[in-house]
Image (cartoon, rainbow, N blue to C red):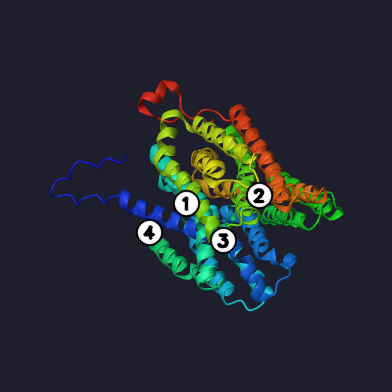
Amino acid sequence: MTTHAPAAPDTAPAAPARPRPRALALAVLCASMLMIVLDGSIVTVALPAIQGDLHFSPADLTWTVNAYLIAFGGLLLLAGRLGDLIGRKRVFVAGLALFTAASLLCAVATGQGMLIAARFLQGVGGAMASAVSLGMVVTLYPEPGERGRAIGAFSFVGAAGASIGQVLGGVLTQALSWHWIFLINLPLGLTAALLAVRVLAADDGPGLRAGADALGAALITAALMLGIYTIVGTGAHAWTSARTLGLGALSLVLLAAFLLRQARAAQPLLPLRMFRSRNVSGANAVQLLTISGMFAFQILVALYLQQVLGYGAAATGLAMLPAAVAIGAVSLLLSARLGARFGERAVLLAGLAMLVVALGLLARLPADADYPVHLLPTMLLIGGGGLVLSALAVLGMSGAGPEDAGTASGLFNTTQQVGGALGVAVLTTLADGRSGALTAAGHPAAEALTGGFRLAFTVAAGLLAVALVLAAVVLRPTVNPADRQGDRPQPAQ
């Protein structure tokens, strides 16, 4: 907790209070992140309306989502490094402005090409704002206890935003039109950008000449964009197709070239010294597996509710709302306290164990599930995500100094986006393949679909189990039992 200094003598001016400006700055960062996360999920509910209005084919319609994902995931690392070099506040505000302007272009789009191009620009702006946000939170709250609470609030916004977006998207689309899912970003984005200019502290970096690794930037951006493009394309092209294998191999070659460049460059885009920390490397690897598995919950449960149980868009969002509430309660009320008491590693392990059980329960879903019996327990156990996301964020940023905070934030967000894209591609492919096989064998449609979802949930639970084992083996405790009386977390190793 922040303590107040004794009153100054009458002859001395009162010292300015720090907590309020920091709290307002954190609120701006959280609100901006909420808007960006909402946009990622709110669009999925409106896709049928967009398809009918702009006459998209089913294959072309996916690019309204993929264009955003490719730009967002491909530019996070570069945007994070730019924040370290020219100032995180500058990159953040520019990202918000671009995201807001692109939202207006999306709302007034009259053709397929215009909407897809605007969605790509939205991804660029979202990447710029998101890449530096976590680094700014860490800089705002250097004290471990306060930092844990701030990251808990930030993680809650990210986790809850997806579920809120599904509800909001359904309501706006049904009550008004799909244009409003983008128009709503205008007042939010403009307000956040104006407040950010006023309340975020200036943090001018050393400039582009101090570390503008142009070749490294080109290699990693191309590798990430091509990799995500390859992953999201597996819905139309098999994993073993020449296209998928060829593009995937080229993406890996570009990634290897980037790592070689970083090892030799005088001013690397991604300093490899950050990976010397077992907690930083391990947290990013665990997050890749965790997000891949958790996307089974967010995407596939929504599909199960609509395709098998017959829920509408708004009803689906409401059905998933208990998960958002559980994550929010755990993130805001428990994660920081438990992290200070037991260490982030222990909190992470407990949260992962809850998620393994939650996804394991979904692996036994029947085709005629009763929501309170078969789904509500999972919704509540998903609250473990509030422990996982907060602990991973602390561990993933633990090895970053002030000069690398933007880069570490960009790296952490990149593994999150790649994990999400990979999880959706792999798990939906498995579900579709299994459902097709069951349909061909003569099973009713609902049972065939449920069989596919069960397989995907089983694999997702397995990914989370691997993440649990990896976290237990690789990550180091952040609290020394000898220091637990004072709740003083130890530096990450």
- Looking at the image, tell me whether mark 4 or mark 3 is earlier in sequence order: 4
Residues at circles 4 and 3 in contact by the CB criterion of under 8 Å: no
User: In front: mark 2 or mark 3?
Assistant: 3
Q: Circle 4: is it few (<14), some (14-19), or many (20+) Cα within 10 Å?
A: some
Q: Earlier in the sequence, mark 1 or mark 4?
A: 1
Question: Upstream in the sequence, badge 4 or badge 2?
Answer: 4
Q: Nearer the viewer, mark 1 or mark 2?
A: 1
Mark 3 residue type: Ala
Q: 296 left or right of 244?
A: left
Q: What residue sits 80% from the left and 49% below the top?
A: 442
Q: Position of residue 146 (x, y in %)?
A: 38, 41
Is 68 or 173 nearer to us in this picture?
Answer: 173
Residue 306 image position (x, y, % from top left): 62, 56
Q: Earlier in the sequence, mark 1 or mark 2?
A: 1
Residue identified by numbered label 2 = 418
Q: Of tags 1 and 4, which is closer to the observer? A: 1
Q: Is residue 401 left or right of residue 8?
A: right
Residue ID for mark 1: 157
Q: Which tag is nearer the camera, tag 4 or tag 3?
A: 3
- C-alpha distance separating marks 1 and 2: 20 Å
For label 1, count other residues whose C-alpha is less than 10 Å away and answer few (under 14), some (14-19) or many (20+).
many
Badge 1 vs badge 2, beta-carbon distance below 8 Å = no
Q: Which residue is mark 4?
A: 199
Position in image of residue 368 (x %, y %): 62, 47
* Amino acid beneath label 1: Val
